[in-house]
Image (cartoon, rainbow, N blue to C red):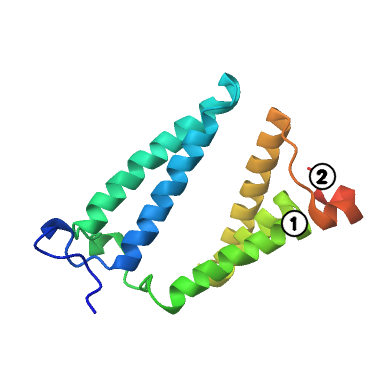
Amino acid sequence: MDDTRDESAFPAFSGVPWGRRLFDLAIGGAIVLAVVGALDLPWAAKLFPISVGTATLALWIFHVVNAWRGTRASQAAFDATSESAEGWPAVRMWGWMLGYLVLLPLLGFLPASVAFIVGFLRIEGRTSWLTVLVVGALALGLTGGLGLALNVYWPQGVLGDLVPWATTF
């Protein structure tokens, strides 16, 4: 069974698997739904989601045109030690994202974000402890400082319920 469109009907899109097309179309549909859903909000509340949604939709269109026409990223964009995004490395990345999503309700936003950054840089990036500590401190300082400046309430999680001072910036 052929996994691509009929080459004679859509010659520019030949060679693109159906699974990729369906995934790309589902992502585009989610973006459109988010923008349309924001249209009913008051002016101040819909400005940000519509702006970001419109920019994301433009980037999505650019991605679909390039991906479906067969344009590939230059090898110069990848270093010699990088692995392909297919197979187990992709599963590992999804595992990191899932782990971060699990940490968020447990630790709260700030500690989970710092733990994710430190763990990812140390394990996946194989960076030195000095770099990990500097980037972790910068992430905590910038995120926490921005939260203080804008009076943002960061979700606390279970740790914040048990030990409130541990998650307060």
Q: Is residue 145 above or below residue 26?
A: above
- x and y percentages locating residue 105 in the rendered image: 75, 56
Q: Is residue 36 left or right of residue 83?
A: right
Amino acid under disc 1: Pro
Amino acid under disc 2: Thr
Res. 55 in view: yes
Residue placed under numbered mark 1 in the picture: 105
First along the sequence among labels 1 and 2: 1
List the single residue furthest toward the right: 162
Looking at the rendered structure, the secondary structure element under dot 1 is helix
Tell me the number on the disc at residue 168: 2
Q: Residue at x 88, y 49 (%)?
A: 164
> Which of the image's four quarters has the N terminus?
bottom left
- x and y percentages locating residue 34 in the rendered image: 50, 40
Q: Is residue 117 left or right of residue 87?
A: right
Q: Nearer the viewer, residue 52 or 89?
A: 52
Looking at the rendered structure, the secondary structure element under dot 2 is loop
Q: Residue at x 26, y 57 (%)?
A: 67
- x and y percentages locating residue 155 in the rendered image: 75, 46
Q: Is residue 7 left or right of residue 23?
A: left
Q: Residue at x 41, y 78 (%)?
A: 87
Q: Is residue 101 left or right of residue 38?
A: right
Q: Is residue 168 above or below residue 7?
A: above
Res. 126 in view: no
